[in-house]
């Protein structure tokens, strides 16, 4: 059973890494103009009602080895989930901005969670690389390691890094942003959600 689960995780990781590796290499020019797609915008464009989507549900391990579940969304009105990779230059360029933003808001209102998309739970060598990059960039917020639960709940449609989700306190995804942004651009998005 354990062997089968490891094989499934390896296949899931290989799939996501193949998609992400091909997307991030497009350079910082493209990431300066991120694509934003919200479910409500898609529904408006097609003239359809927004379908019900279940809240995000996962259990994962953070970079400190502690278990974190989707219950973490209830800690803040708004959570920014930033999917990044250790090889992704645009990801690393924006992480200092995210670290600053994480410290500028009340945790009751806003929090940031990173998902290290190319570091599987249990891969100590890759974890060391991720920890070094987190420290270098000042991205002092919770970072989760890839596992099957995270992959199936949030990452199956992720085709590029960075990809950022905005999630409400009930675990509903409000918006998805593909590409990196500078601090002021992120601040505008965050403040708009918090003012609603």
Image (cartoon, grey):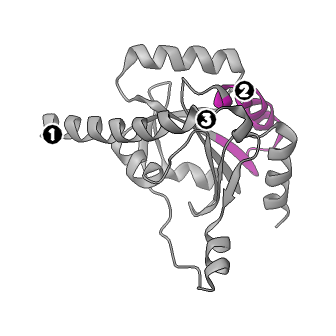
Between the residue at mark 1 and the residue at mark 2, the CA separation in whole angstroms equals 37 Å
* Residue at screen point 51% across, 77% down: 52
Question: Whole-percent x and y of residue 109?
Answer: 76, 52
Label 3: state its secondary structure. loop
Label 3 sits on residue = 26
| Majority secondary structure of magenta residues | helix
In terms of secondary structure, where does tag 2 sit? helix
Quadrant in the picture for residue 83: top right
Q: Is residue 156 visible?
A: yes
User: What is the quadrant of residue 42 in the picture?
Assistant: bottom right
Nearer the observer: mark 3 or 2; the answer is 3
Magenta span of residues: 90-112
Q: Tell me whether circle 3 and circle 2 mark residues in contact (CB < 8 Å).
A: no
Residue 142 is covered by the magenta coloring: no
Residue 76 visible in rendering: no
Q: Nearer the viewer, residue 182 or 105?
A: 182
The reply, left or right, for residue 35 in relation to residue 5 is right
User: Could you say which is closer to the camera, residue 152 or residue 79?
Assistant: 152
Residue 102 is a magenta residue: yes
Identify which residue is drawn at 72% across, 21% down: 138
Kindly report which numbered mark, 3 or 1, lies closer to the viewer in this rendering: 3
Observer-side mark, 1 or 2, equals 2
Q: Residue at x 43, y 54 (%)?
A: 153
- In the image, which disc is placed on residue 67? none
The quadrant the N terminus occupies is top left
Image coordinates of residue 134 in percent, x first then y, are 62, 21
Residue corresponding to mark 2:
93
Identify the residue under disc 1: 4
Judge whether 167 appears above or below 146 on screen.
below
* 87 to the left or right of 77: left
């Amino acid at each position: 059973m354990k062997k089968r689960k490891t094989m499934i995780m390896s296949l899931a990781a290989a799939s996501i890494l193949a998609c992400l590796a091909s997307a991030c290499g497009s350079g910082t020019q493209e990431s300066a103009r991120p694509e934003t797609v919200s479910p409500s915008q898609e529904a408006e464009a097609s003239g359809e009602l927004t379908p019900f989507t279940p809240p995000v549900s996962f259990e994962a391990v953070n970079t400190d080895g502690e278990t974190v579940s989707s219950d973490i969304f209830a800690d803040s009105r708004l959570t920014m989930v930033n999917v990044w990779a250790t090889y992704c230059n645009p990801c690393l360029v924006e992480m200092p901005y995210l670290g600053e933003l994480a410290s500028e808001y009340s945790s009751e209102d806003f929090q940031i969670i990173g998902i290290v998309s190319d570091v599987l739970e249990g891969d100590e060598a890759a974890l060391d690389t991720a920890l070094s990059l987190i420290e270098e960039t000042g991205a002092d917020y919770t970072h989760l390691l890839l596992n099957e639960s995270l992959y199936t709940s949030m990452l199956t449609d992720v085709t590029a890094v960075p990809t950022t989700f905005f999630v409400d306190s009930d675990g509903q995804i409000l918006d998805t942003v593909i590409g990196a942004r500078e601090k002021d651009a992120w601040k505008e998005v965050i403040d708009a959600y918090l003012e609603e």
